[in-house]
Image (tube, helix red, strand yellow):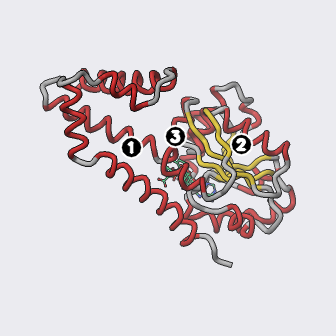
Amino acid sequence: MAQSLIGGLIASGYNKQNIIATDPTEAQRNSVTQNFGIHCLADNAEAIQRSDIVVLAVKPQVLESVCHSIADAVQAKKPLIISVAAGIRSDDINRWLGSNTAIVRTMPNTPALIQTGATGLFANTFVSNEQQSQAEHILRAAGITVWVDEEAKLDAVTALSGSGPAYYFMFMEAMEQTAQTLGLDEKTAHLLTLQTALGAAKMALESHQDCATLRKNVTSPNGTTERAIQSFENAGLHQIVENAMKAAQTRAQELADELGGKA
Ligand SMILES: NC(=O)C1=CN([C@@H]2O[C@H](COP(=O)(O)OP(=O)(O)OC[C@H]3O[C@@H](n4cnc5c(N)ncnc54)[C@H](OP(=O)(O)O)[C@@H]3O)[C@@H](O)[C@H]2O)C=CC1
Ligand SMILES: O=C(O)[C@@H]1CCC=N1
């Protein structure tokens, strides 16, 4: 995720010299430096000392220990903290880092790498208006941004746009594979699948009509689409999607309860 954000920032013209990454693994540091032309340090405290904004992009499972290890540096420098970790609540991050820390909790997604990301943001009470604008500026370099007024809504954003790219990739995988069983070669199946996904998303974005109307426009009476849609409905597609997204939201809440909430 960090690499997606770094890639998005650089592609949108952000000055590379203002970005410092950190990573504990030497090979990973070398690869980041090679791929993005930015400094990648081993020492988080040193990076924080040199920064006004710190993005926490580690796995939720290691966020607590990382926060404890950087707490002194954060208290000394008082940077704006931006977390991209799924689930983990800003109150827990605040407690792990000391206290009174300005934290913007976000939920971006990997299309940030090509500046087509979608990010939900929530600011805790210590975030100033200027810091809120700074956080928005950084995440907007990677795509669109949406502020939520209650932190719990970020778990819904996670279930929708955070995890969402994987749902579409999975659907595309299934379409590609099926197209091959219907007789198309792999390259043709891949190309037509991707262009169809792009065309549908672009049409939905640019049209004034909602998705249901756009779907109906493709569906000729007694035609091919109608048969396919009927098959999806018979299989309970809406319920399948609802179950999956609720499972993702529940997992985000579980992560917060399992990994946060400890004094
Ligand atoms: N993947 C996604 O689509 C999205 C992910 N997220 C969130 O982003 C976060 C990262 O996820 P993801 O990018 O998939 O995970 P990755 O495991 O790919 O990235 C985590 C990175 O953190 C590094 N790291 C581990 N410990 C430290 C440390 N002490 N100091 C500095 N860096 C460290 C790891 O280094 P090394 O590998 O060398 O150990 C690794 O490069 C998670 O909290 C996730 O919830 C949010 C939105 C979408
Ligand atoms: O799967 C995950 O937990 C992360 C958060 C959203 C997307 N990837």
| Mark 3 C-beta closer than 8 Å to ligand 1 | yes
Label 2: few (<14), some (14–19) or many (≥20) C-alpha neighbours in 10 Å: some
- The answer to whether 146 is drawn above or below residue 61 in the figure is above
Report the amino acid beneath label 2. Ile
- The answer to whether 162 is drawn above or below residue 64 in the figure is above
Element class at badge 1: helix
Question: Marks 3 and 2, Cα distance to the nearest angstrom?
Answer: 19 Å
Report the amino acid beneath label 3. Thr
- Nearer the observer: mark 1 or 2; the answer is 1
Q: Quadrant of residue 132?
A: top right
User: Which of 129 and 96 lies nearest the eye of the viewer?
Assistant: 129
Instruction: Name the spot of residue 241 as percent of width and height, x first.
Output: 36, 49
Residue behind mark 1 = 167
Residue behind mark 2 = 20
Element class at badge 3: helix
Of mark 3 and mark 1, the one earlier in the sequence is 3
Element class at badge 2: strand
Q: Quadrant of the C terminus?
A: bottom right
- Nearer the observer: mark 3 or 2; the answer is 3
Q: Quadrant of the N terminus?
A: top right
Residue behind mark 3 = 110
- Nearer the observer: mark 3 or 1; the answer is 1
Of mark 1 and mark 2, the one earlier in the sequence is 2
- The answer to whether 21 is drawn above or below residue 37 in the figure is below
Q: Quadrant of residue 140?
A: top right
User: Which of 109 and 219 lies nearest the eye of the viewer?
Assistant: 219
Question: Marks 3 and 1, Cα distance to the nearest angstrom?
Answer: 13 Å
Circles 1 and 2 in contact, beta carbons < 8 Å: no
Residue furthest to the front in view is: 221
The numbered disc on residue 47 is none
Question: Marks 1 and 2, Cα distance to the nearest angstrom?
Answer: 32 Å
